[in-house]
Image (spheres, rainbow, N blue to C red):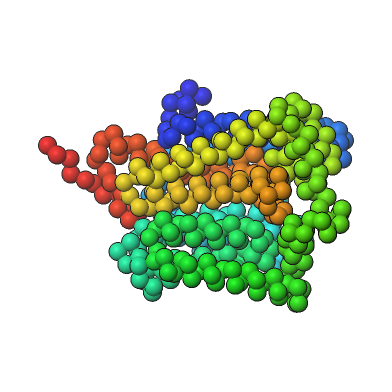
Amino acid sequence: MTNILKNIKGDKVIWVVVAFLSIFSLLAVYSSTGTLAYRKQGGNTEYYLFKHFLILAFGLGMMYIAHIVKYTYYSRISQIGLVITVPLLLITLISGTNLNEANRWLTVPIVNLTFQSSDVAKLFLILYLARVLSKKQEQIKKFRSGFLPVIAPAILICSLILPANFSTAALLFVTCMVLMFVGRINLKYIFSLIGLGFVSIVLIFVLAKTVPNIFPRGETWISRVDNFMHQEKATPDANYQVEQSKIAVVSGGLLGKSPGKSTQRNFLPHPYSDFIFAIIIEEYGLLGGTFVLLLYCILFYRVIRIASRCQGNFGSFLSIGIGFSLVFQAMINMAVAVHLFPVTGQTLPMISMGGTSIWFTCISIGIILSVSRRTEIETKDGTEIEILGEVEKKAVPA
């Protein structure tokens, strides 16, 4: 253990943030799975705690491994990852495991491990876009040689995720646009893309209403938006999750009911994943919820700091893309819990219960730490500088 602690490098503040999020995750999952344990495990409330602890411990192990790998290697890994991602998403659409009327999951034979292919796609697409943007900086303002190589894979991956998971596709597309903005893509292309995105969303919702067979999840998307926009007209069943979440938030008050004393965990359909932030506020109050929000803000601040200090484009784009994706997802989850946003099904990164979600979040944070680790070395000795995703030796003055 002492040797591991000595070998932990990178931004120490991010490590501390991860530690706090992990503690909140264990406490919140243990509290929110009580009803689930009585329903499926005969009242063994420690079952899900132990399972979640193992998942979290394995995820932190992957984070450690990811942070000791030189981040420039992820540039090459992204090419292989993107090639693997496309058939994975196609298989998921055709024969994925059905959950909530959506084929989002793949099951690995023999080991019977189920994972969400969109988690894989998000990470590899961000890695790939960071690579392409860093390599195309000299012609980045041009349409054919700068914009098309970036937008083509983004549209392909988001389109494959869209039929089963609209919110994840939208979140990933927004992340891609942020990356393109940071990567100095011509603003007229970005604004055109935003306009095209709005038109596409309207068209999708129109088609979902008129031709339901095209988008099996279309009716769910429309009802969630309608219920959010016209709350007074919604039936009690339609806004059941949101109403129970608001009760949890209100009953938490300033200091909360204290750990383990949530009552709304017995009524919320997914208190350990989609609405875990509501349980945190109920048990730890407004102060606890604000502290969790502050942790994500600190994480994003440190990511921006790492990106600004990194001497090469690839590391900067990598940090911004991954950091924005994680924090933006967290903000959406928290906004849903307090009814500032329609229900999306997005988990709270590093806190919600779930295997692939936690593992890929850990790997993502590990990559950010890898960038900060290399940045520390460059800052200290000034002997290396990254150019377009590769590392070149820089002459040291005598």
Q: Residue at x 80, y 40 (%)?
A: 247
Position of residue 144 relative to residue 165, above or below, is below
* Residue 104, x across and y down, in percent: 69, 59
Identity of the residue furthest to the top in this view: 2
For the residue pair 152 and 45, the one nearer the viewer reads as 152
* Residue 110, x across and y down, in percent: 69, 52
Q: Is residue 110 visible?
A: no
Identity of the residue furthest to the bottom in this view: 211
Q: Residue at x 35, y 65 (%)?
A: 140
Position of residue 226 relative to residue 326, above or below, is below
For the residue pair 24 and 49, the one nearer the viewer reads as 24
Q: Residue at x 41, y 65 (%)?
A: 187
* Residue 206, x across and y down, in percent: 70, 74
Identity of the residue furthest to the front in this view: 232
In the picture, residue 68 is in which quadrant? top left
* Residue 190, x across and y down, in percent: 46, 66
Q: Is residue 369 visible?
A: yes
